[in-house]
Amino acid sequence: MKIMIVLSELMMPMIFVYIIAYGYSKKTDVYDTFVIGAQTGAKIVFKIMPTLIGLMVAVGMLRESGALDIFTKLLSPLTNIIGIPKEAVPLTFMRLVSSSASTGILLDIFKNHGPDSYIGRFVSVMMSCTETVFYTMSIYFMSVGIKKTRYTLFGALLSNFAGIIASLWICNLLWT
């Protein structure tokens, strides 16, 4: 066990040393390359800033307006049939938009039900099996200038739904 702790503590320094050594072995000016990459990254951040602000405002409005509660009540007959706990429904939708907001909902679920409860385990597995689709698409597509997403949204939503169903199946298999 001690070896794993030592390895985990040394992992990041070893990666940095490896990158620098690899750059020098290829006769690359590592520092100048780093500075150019940092400048490019800063330009991308300024380019996507309006999208980030818009997403944050939308998430705040969605959480504070009570729309998630209304949506949960509307979907509760369907989620009851599927077997998704009603407390997890807001998390499934918030997860599509914001990782930090969904983490806040996750912590609320942990506080109310406990992390070792069935719902705590379900939402933990679900958070690992799903992605922040709208956030990821907006950031990545804005940063490279893609305007037509084609089938990306449908595929991402379908894979998120598959992740939710897989989480439900895994949790039912292991903990019921």
Image: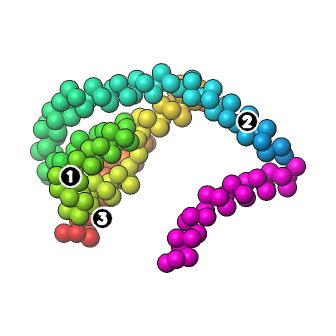
Of the residues under marks 3 and 2, which one precedes in the sequence?
2
Left or right of 153? Residue 142 is right
- Look at 73% across and 58% down and name the residue there: 18
Q: Which residue is mark 2?
A: 35
Residue nearest the observer in this picture, 45 or 172: 45
Q: Which residue is mark 3?
A: 170
Give the residue at the far right of this rendering: 27
Give the residue at the far top of this rendering: 50
Residue 133 visible in the snapshot: yes
Residue 4, horizontal then vertical, whole percent: 53, 73
Residue nearest the observer in this picture, 54 or 138: 54
Q: Secondary structure at mark 2?
A: helix
Q: Is residue 101 placed above or below 5 in the rendered structure?
A: above
Residue 6, horizontal then vertical, whole percent: 57, 70
Q: Which residue is mark 1?
A: 111
- Look at 13% across and 50% down and name the residue there: 80
Q: Secondary structure at mark 1?
A: helix
Of the residues under marks 1 and 2, which one precedes in the sequence?
2
Residue 150 visible in the snapshot: no
- Look at 80% across and 51% down and name the residue there: 23
Label 3 or label 2, whichever lies nearer to me, is: 2
Main SS, magenta region, reads helix
Q: CA distance from mark 3 to mark 1?
A: 23 Å
Q: CA distance from mark 3 to mark 2?
A: 45 Å
Q: Which residues are magenta?
A: 1-27
Residue 138, horizontal then vertical, whole percent: 48, 31
Q: Secondary structure at mark 3?
A: helix
Q: Amino acid at mark 3?
A: Ile
Residue nearest the observer in this picture, 124 or 3: 3
